[in-house]
Amino acid sequence: MILHALDEYYRRKCDDPDPAQRLPDFGWETKEIPFILDIDADGALVQLCDTRELQGKKKVAQAFRVPMAVKRASGVVANLLWDTLEYVLGVDTKGKPERVAEQHAAFRARMAALPAQAQADVGLQAVLRFLEGFDPAALHHHPAWAEMLETNPLLSLRLHGDEGLVCQRPAVAQAVRTMAAAEDDEGGASAMCLVSGMHGPVQRLHAAIKGVWGAQTSGANIVSFNARAFESYGKTERQGENAPVGRAAAFAYTTALNHLLRKDSRQRMQVGDASTVFWTEKAAPFETLFGDVFQDDPDQAGAVRALLEALHSGRLAGPEGDNRFHVLGLAPNAARISVRFYHCLPLRELGRRVARHFEDLKLVHGPNEAPYPSLFRLLTAVALQGKADNVPPSLGGGIVNAVLAGENAPYPRLWLNAAVGRCRAERQVTYLRAAALKACLNRQIRLHPSSEKEFLPMLDLANPHPAYRLGRLFAVLEKAQEEASPGLNATIRDRYYGAASSTPVAVFTTLLRLKNAHLKKLNPARAQWFEKLLGEVLAPVAEFPAHLALPDQGRFALGYYHQRQDFFTKKPDTASPGTPDTPNVPETADTSEGAAA
């Protein structure tokens, strides 16, 4: 399913109207080549061109279409008319002159193996003359030569006056296509391709996939067999025969996946340890906007609004909504790549599920808070010290997987645990933590229907759950203390929040006794208002529980957050002052995350 979808995407991108986005034909690939040797027809070096351009703080090389790279580990095998400095020029950069001599000989032998028609090409003849008379001293004056000796970069060659490389000249390109077709017909096992359904030669070693965060820099594989434990049905020591994929299909899916994972791709995002790529069956604007929905950047809110607008306007109700959307999460696994998650669903359904995610997160908040929290902010809010390095590696991927699986799929239990843990450790129920708690609890309620109703974005005066009521109670007691002793550096939250949210019976008797001393400092009308509010909050609570389970600690935190936010929410002008439902509290502009905590 995954390889078939990537194969279809490759075929669509081969006909892309934008040449920069067009994928190479079978036998070719796109490669970033930092340096180009510009030579004339006599083989004389005209100049050494540095193709790199400064993008931000890094130099990024220009990408060129070149013959497909050979697969090598420790052996000496050369690419055709492009390779590292050691292979192309035979210059030793690592103190291994004998090996470099072998590499350079392999590079020249690869050119010598080309058909006669390609051998007669002017460009190839110029390359051979250049290599025969090359003198490294000719490059010593170049500003980048010292860097080249240190990094052993990729090189290719171009005939002076041509726009393309020598390997792209018609005669050489035709030879590459001919050799690729001949290789496809020769030797090796023949079987039905699992991707195309066609009978033909099986690709024994699949091309490496690069760009997966945490995997080997040289690339890793999705399909590979290198030990007897992975082999089956007598297909021993023949690697790719265990999962027969035709050579053309193997080229197609690896080329498409490497294209999606490239550095400047707008169709990839990093979700925890999962490098996530996405694409549509047919070209669509949302193909590149999906990443903005979860990313932490200025376009995030606009992307969410665009998606919700498309849903509400009915634009996705027609044929555009039938366009299937693919999301693939990849994670490193030693020398291989594991599939963390994969979803394929119509754009219409995808929009609904993403919209439901933000509806689950919807919560009353201060004016400076983001209405659509990004995944990065949600993750760092529940991490130790708010650092991304402390986010559990699998948490981000688990959240995205739950979003794409639908509204009845639970969020990772780890998310709820982390949010409750940070609230207790820091004694602060912030907007993002409360949003995470609401989303996790509502999905649990939805997954296991009971008499409990889902939590609202704002204070729910009718919610009778004891843990939610105790959270509200704690917020009211803290508010009474703040009004009785203005300017306090620490409140009951700093001392009692952890115990109150886990073992209420051990704490609330003390807090209610302290409350009496606080109310004595207030004017009688205000003290009476607090007493009425406390009575309303405690009405459904028959007794203080001895212990609150982890989900109930989340309900406690949510009740506390809702009640605190309600204190700083402007009430309608028609509200009756002094009633428990509409507290007569002066409005304040300080409704920030810190104030809500």
Image (cartoon, helix red, strand yellow):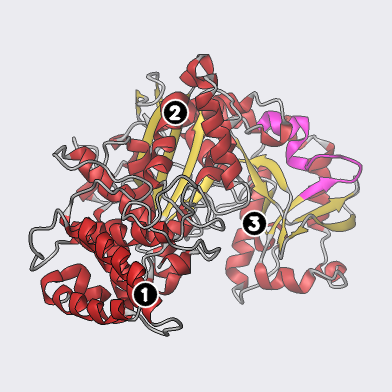
Nearer-the-camera pick, 43 or 347? 347
Residue pointed to by mark 1: 523
Residue at the location (14% across, 61% down)?
Answer: 549
Say which quarter of the image contains residue 333.
Answer: bottom left
Based on the picture, tell me whether residue 31 belongs to the magenta stretch.
Answer: no
Position of residue 440 measured from the top left corner of the image (x, y, whole percent): 29, 50
Instruction: Please give the range of residues in magenta.
Output: 157-175
Q: Earlier in the sequence, mark 3 or mark 2?
A: 2
SS at circle 1: loop
Q: Nearer the viewer, residue 17 or 431?
A: 431
Residue 478 percent location from the top left of the image: 32, 73
- Frontmost of labels 3 and 2 is 2
Residue 384 is situated, as x and y percent measured from the top left of the image, at 38, 72
- Quadrant where the C terminus sits is bottom left
Q: Which quadrant is the N terminus positioned in? A: top left
- Residue at mark 3: 105
Question: According to the image, label 2 marks what residue?
Answer: 5
Q: Amino acid at mark 3?
A: Ala
